[in-house]
Image (tube, grey):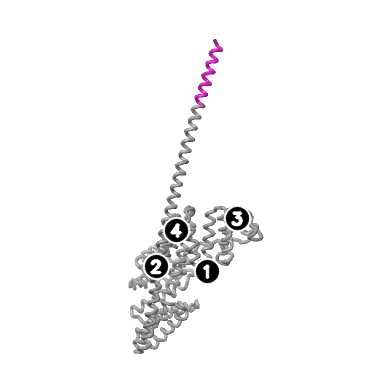
Amino acid sequence: MRHLYSIFLLCTLFLFGFSGQVTAQQTNVDSLKEVLRFDSLNKLPKADTLTINTLIQLSTAYRLTNLDSTMRYAKLAAKKSTEHHFTKGLLESQYLILTVYFNRGEYQQVYDIAQSALEKPETVGYPQQLALMNQLVGVSYASQGNYQQGLEYFLRAKELFGELDNDIRIFQNLNNIGVCYLKLEDYPEALDIFLKLDALHTLDATTISIPVNLGFIYYELKEYDKAEAQLMRVLNFDGAAYDKRSVGLTTFKLGDIALQRKKYLKALAYFNRSIKIYEGFHNELEKIQSLNGIALTYLEMNELDEALDYAEKAFGIAHTNDALPEEQRSAETLYRVYKVQKKYQESLSYLELSTSLSNSLKNKKISREVGALEAEYKFKDQDLKFREAQQRENLKNTELIANQHIIILVSLALLIIVLTVAILQYRNSATRKRANKLLQEK
């Protein structure tokens, strides 16, 4: 029952990917336009860094309210930056363009533009902008369920933000890395990261996802006591407003734990509580996991009519919404219920459907793994190019410093020669004066 959990995780990824970037929303758009002093975009003053930076600020100001305006000003800023070889302005405007494509779900555009920008040697000197791009590409891959690819970019973003000593961004990307390991079912790695994050920060509205993640990880490791302890931290949290879906996930997983312990009434209570929370969000999809949990609980209790009723509800919602993993699991539950009822024709039908859906999921997983290998190759190639460009930049700087040292030494040598000549001329002049004086005295 992991697919719907990923919905919450992706929201977490999104929030961590963009928190701290919305301060420009407070910018006074009218005052920014006044700086530009234009009536239409076709009558801009001569572009300079002030003009480009103002266009970028305007684009940023619209980012959460009007994507078309964000794109409009960002593209204009990118065009002017290219014309004036203003690399920093180009990277910042391209990042804003990427955020628009991301919000529209046009991920291939994100990959193409970011890949082009990240490969250019002249961008090496702008780690802040490169780090943001890497982070956004990682979020884009994760949003499509391609966690292996996303992981590579999150690791690169974390490295760059580490060089900048940006603790907030390091935390964001560590969280994203932990989510990727969790989704890739590398539970020891995920556990290590989330335990570190938990030790670094007190529990508040922005970190409420950490005990949720820890609870799910401990559950997969079959350490139910530890899982329950982490999840109860969420239920007992009484801080400021936070994402209540975390409570929906928490109560669902506590229901799973109770079911494993054969505490059926407790399991039903938690599953029903989770459903009630999601009904408040009018989100049918996120109810499926708890509906199926109730069906499995009633099956264990041998209350087959109730089990069948809830399994059919779960399957119906999953099928209607094309939620393939949930459809497969609820079909498997229906197969088990009908088998216990000795309705073998229906049981066989759902077994075949469950197997077919499982094969489809496996094929998708294989496709993702192939894509992951391709992305890893591209990432390594890009990383190698980046490091080579960085080495060339370092060598260039070293040569520049060496040349400056040579110039300084030559200048000092010339100064010494000039001073020496001046001193000699002064001495010769003084000597001649003394000689002339002696001749006059004779």
Determine which residue is flagged by label 3.
51
Q: Which comes before the other along the chain, label 3 or label 4?
A: 3
Q: What segment carries the magenta color? A: 422-442
| Residue 167 tag number | 4
Residue at (61, 59) in percent of width and height: 32
Q: Secondary structure at mark 4?
A: helix
Q: Which comes before the other along the chain, label 4 or label 2?
A: 4
Q: Secondary structure at mark 2?
A: helix
User: What is the distance, in whole Å, between disc 3 and disc 4 at their CAs?
Assistant: 31 Å
User: What is the distance, in whole Å, between disc 3 and disc 1 at their CAs?
Assistant: 27 Å
Q: Which comes before the other along the chain, label 4 or label 1?
A: 1
Determine which residue is flagged by label 2.
370
User: What is the distance, in whole Å, between disc 1 and disc 2 at their CAs?
Assistant: 25 Å
Q: Position of residue 24 (x, y in %)?
A: 55, 61
Determine which residue is flagged by label 1.
104
Tell me if I can see residue 437 in this picture: yes
Kindly identify the amino acid type of the residue bearing the numbered disc 1: Arg
Depth order, front residue of 42/249: 42
Residue at (54, 18) in percent of width and height: 433
